[in-house]
Amino acid sequence: MKVILNKDLSTLGEEGDVRDVAKGYARNYLFPRSIALPYNESTIRLFESRRGEIEGRKAEKREAAKGLKERLEALELVFSMPAGANGRLFGSVTSQTVADELSRQGFQIERKRLELPGATFKSAGKYKVTVHLYESASAEITVAVQAQIEKAKEAPPARGRRRRDEAPPVESAPAPETAASAETAASVETTKAAETVETAIPETVEAAPSGAAEAPAEVATDTPQN
């Protein structure tokens, strides 16, 4: 069915535009919200009486679009994205990515008004994004995509069991002793051996026990003479 837009609607048009829409869409969405009115003689007369007012608002929109164009074209958006060594992004820059960044910088622009070459940016470089403003007015934004090269992580050394037929690791031999230290060690060992022998030999002479009876002296007997 044919309707006349009472308000601007980005998906259909501006105030005063005549559009053909589905009946259900008009009755369930457009009419209850006063976004559009049925196209008939009474509504045509109504909008004809408002023609000057509507054109005045359109002129204001053109001026606003002109100022916005100048501000946008002086802008450069920079995105730093993870990428491989060849500059190929692991993700991509989309129209939603650009719209979010514009919103962060104070520009409320719908994603569908942004036109990206190739729909998305998948490599590092500089690009131009077209922003459709009002009627035929548009602006070009410079978008710089920088590659954030990720370094490859070093793998930890493998820790496995030694095979049975694998030779055990060779231990390094201790450094040989110097002549002076060897001589000192030999002298110490000789002294210790002497002390050990001296301690092990028992005393051979023992003192006689006190109070023991002395051996009786030999008694001479006189033989009687005949």
Image (tube, rainbow, N blue to C red):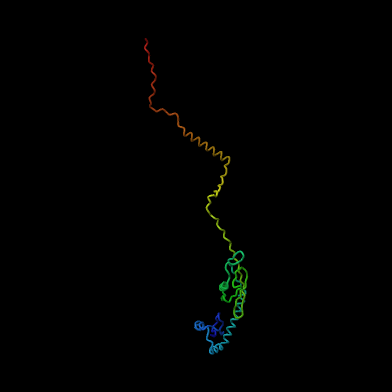
Residue 160: x, y in percent? 53, 54
The total of numbered circles placed on residues is 0
Q: Identify the image quadrant of the C terminus.
A: top left
Who is closer to the viewer here, 82 or 54?
A: 82
| Outermost top residue | 226
Q: Is residue 99 above or below residue 52?
A: above
Q: Residue 66 falls in which quadrant of the image?
A: bottom right
Q: Determine the residue located farthest toward the front in the rendered image.
A: 165
Q: Is residue 150 left or right of residue 32?
A: right
Residue nearer the viewer, 76 or 151: 151
- Given residues 107 and 35, the one toward you in this image is 35
Q: Horizontal and vertical percent for residue 137?
A: 61, 79
**Residue 74 drawn at (x, y percent):** 62, 74
Residue 12 placed where, x, y %? 55, 81
Give the answer, above or below, for where 170 lies relative to 189.
Answer: below
